[in-house]
Each structure stands twice: as structure tokens, then as C-alpha cells.
Amino acid sequence: AAAEGEARAVGEKHKVLEEKYESILQKYSVNRDVTSTLEDITNRYMEERALRRKYYNQLVAMRGNIRVMCRLKPCSDETVPYSVEGESLTVTLKNGKQRGFKFDSIIPQGVTQEKMYASTAEDLIQSLLDGYNVCVMAYGQTGSGKTY
């Protein structure tokens, strides 16, 4: 009778251990599925990121890697007669001659700094985040707002 009781106790312990083992296997299987899904999502993200970068670089190459922009600011002392037509700027000199200039973009007077940033720097920031070197060179009169 004592041996039968011991055998039952061992059998019950064996059942408990088998249940725990099955539970651990199920958890491992779920974790493996989650890990597999996470790896799939990560791989798809990396592929999409590479594709976005490729298309963005093609867009930048089509636009040109170097862009020259002109921001028109109000003159303080003298008024210099000029006219803007698309991306062309024509300035009338004091002797009456006209000089023409072409730019990739002309930003008119009255544009806020926020709009100026949106039209110029956002692309540069994206290129910088993609690992490319970027440079902004500002040329103009002292006190004309180049630093800002």
C-alpha cells in the first residue's frame, strides 16, 4: 500500500511536470512567433527605408545637387528697380543697363522665416539624416538675416 501511494505521488508529480513542460513549450512557441513577426516587420521597414532613400536620392539628382536660390529683401536706402519672371531676376542698373540672373528658385519679399525654412532646409535635413554631407552657403549684406 505504501508503494502504491508513493507511485501515485510520483505519477502526480510527473503529470504536473508534463503540464509545466507543455506550458513552457507553448510560451516558447508564442515567443518564437512574436520574434519571427518582429523580424519580418523590421526587415520590411529596412526595405522600405532603403527604397525611400533611393527614390529621394533620384529626386535630388533630378533637381540637381547644387541649388542657387535668391531671397528678395526690401532695400533700406535706395530702391533698385528689378523684375521677377519665374526663376529669372532682371535688375536695372543706375546707368540704365539691365542685368539678368537665373536661379533655381526666387523667394519673394514678405516670406516668413518658417516658409523660407520649409522651402529650403527640409530637403537638406532629410539628406543629412540619410547620411549625406550638406552645406548651406549664405551670401549677402551685413545684417541682412543670413545667420537666422
Image (tube, helix red, strand yellow):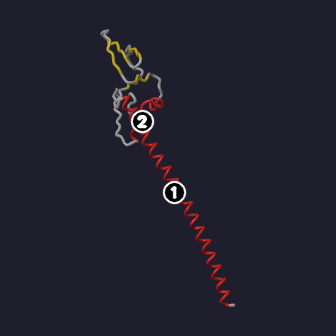
Disc 1 packing (10 Å; few <14; some 14–19; many ≥20): few
Q: Quadrant of the N terminus?
A: bottom right
Q: Secondary structure under badge 1?
A: helix
The spot of residue 40 in percent (x, y) is 49, 51
Residue closest to the eye, 109 or 38: 38
Tell me the residue at 50%/49% (across/down): 41
Q: Horizontally, is 129 left or right of 15 in the view?
A: left
The amino acid type found where label 1 is placed reads Thr
Q: Residue 35 location, x and y as percent?
A: 51, 57
Q: Nearer the viewer, residue 45 or 82?
A: 45
**Residue that appears at 42% across and 35% down:** 55
Q: Return the x and y of residue 114 as percentages of the image width and height.
A: 48, 31
Identify the mark at residue 44; answer none if there is no mark: none
Q: Residue at x 58, y 71 (%)?
A: 21
Q: Are marks 2 and 1 in contact (CB under 8 Å)?
A: no
Neighbour tally class for label 2: few under 14, some 14-19, many 20 plus, Cα within 10 Å:
few
Residue labelled with disc 2: 55
Left or right: 14 in relation to 48: right
Q: Earlier in the sequence, mark 2 or mark 1?
A: 1
Name the foreground residue: 79 vs 102: 102
Residue 20 point in image, percent of width and height? 60, 71
* Residue at 34% in and 40% down: 133
State the CA–CA distance, disc 2 to disc 1. Answer: 30 Å
Displayed quadrant of residue 85: top left
Judged left or right of residue 3, residue 120 is: left
Amino acid at the residue labelled 2:
Tyr
What quarter of the picture does the C terminus occupy?
top left
Picture layout, residue 119 above or below residue 4: above
Above or below — where is 28 with respect to 62? below
Circle 1 residue: 35
